[in-house]
Amino acid sequence: MWLLLAFGSAFFLGWYDISKKISLKDNAVIPVLFLNVLTCCLIFLPAFVLSLLRPELLTGTMFYVPQIPFAEHGYLMLKACIVLSSWLFAYFAMKHLPITITSPVKASQPILTLVGAMLIFSERLNLYQWIGIILSFISFYILSLAGKKEGISFKRNIWVLFIFMAIITGAISGLYDKYLMARFDKMTVQVWYNYYQLILMTMILLFLWFPVRKKTTSFHWSWAIPLIAVCLTVSDFLYFWALSYEDSMIAIVSMIRRGSVIVSFIGGVFLFREKNLKSKALDLLLVLLGMLFIYLGSK
């Protein structure tokens, strides 16, 4: 069951990337990210309020948000800081790089998650799963060659550095999620870390972006902005649900979620008309094969 949930999470994660790319076109990053976080909080608001004021209405359902001691909220604030750091790096990279570059590069994130999972959680992979990992390494190298054709140096481009920082912080977040799922209910984690992110983003918006807004890229509204939050909320809900299973493996769930690159790649082809698709298609094929081997090794 957790494998199916992981694949569903990957599908919505792909649409999350497409929505981000549309929203960030000639647009200011900070307010777009703020509105994304705000929308996520509004989506969870009914469940949060009902769980607090009328818990009997939701108790026993997947939408119930259990309360935790105040001292435990530090764990969720840390989760918010890690995720927000990853999002800031990823949003700026997505704005300045082709989606057919950023999405496959982000797909390498589970490699770091795998190393951490083996060291921290003693997870072990079988032959099929190792083949999937190796294919992912090869696909990343091929993608770097495709980037050179578009004048994007993986060694010198600051936005490539940003996407790598997003990968590192995202891998840390994935490992931390496994720990949180053993300690807290999935809805408690998803709801509270979003609200803590809203507090952090409000401070960033008011004190960092607002004073210099006239000197930077201007902000304009797009209906793709709330779509970011909707896709992310569904994807994260399925993701946390998958991790709540005792036999789930964070390395496998994280790798499957990177299958979102398939959806975002198709968006890059038909919506954004991006270039050098033949070499990137080979990269995508290797990602698909990697996902297949990982799935076969997890059955």
Image (cartoon, rainbow, N blue to C red):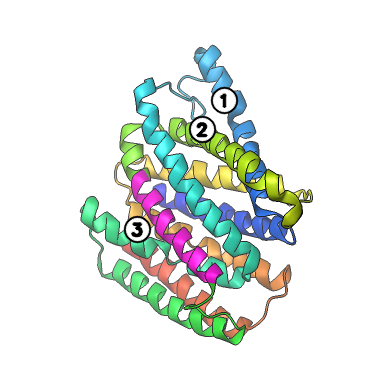
SS majority, magenta: helix
Label disc, if present, on residue 191 of the rendered structure? 2
Question: In the image, residue 213 lies at what x, y percent?
Answer: 72, 50
The residue where tag 1 is placed is 47
Of marks 2 and 1, the one in the foreground: 2
Q: Secondary structure at mark 3?
A: helix
In contact (CB < 8 Å): disc 2 and disc 3: no
Quadrant in the picture for residue 202: top right
- Kind of residue sitting beneath label 3: Thr
Compute the Cα span from label 2 to label 3. Answer: 23 Å
Residue 223, placed above or below residue 39 = below
Q: Locate residue 256 relative to residue 152 in the image: left or right.
A: left
Q: Identify the residue at image location x=62%, y=81%.
A: 277
The residue where tag 3 is placed is 113
Q: Identify the residue at image location x=45%, y=76%.
A: 140
Quadrant in the picture for residue 243: top left
How many residues crowd mark 2 within 10 Å: few (<14), some (14–19), many (20+)?
many
- Kind of residue sitting beneath label 2: Val
In contact (CB < 8 Å): disc 3 and disc 1: no
Going from the N terminus, do you reach mark 3 or mark 1 first? 1
- Kind of residue sitting beneath label 1: Ala
* Residue segment shown in magenta: 158-176
In contact (CB < 8 Å): disc 2 and disc 1: yes
Question: In the image, residue 69 lies at what x, y percent?
Answer: 37, 20
Going from the N terminus, do you reach mark 2 or mark 1 first? 1
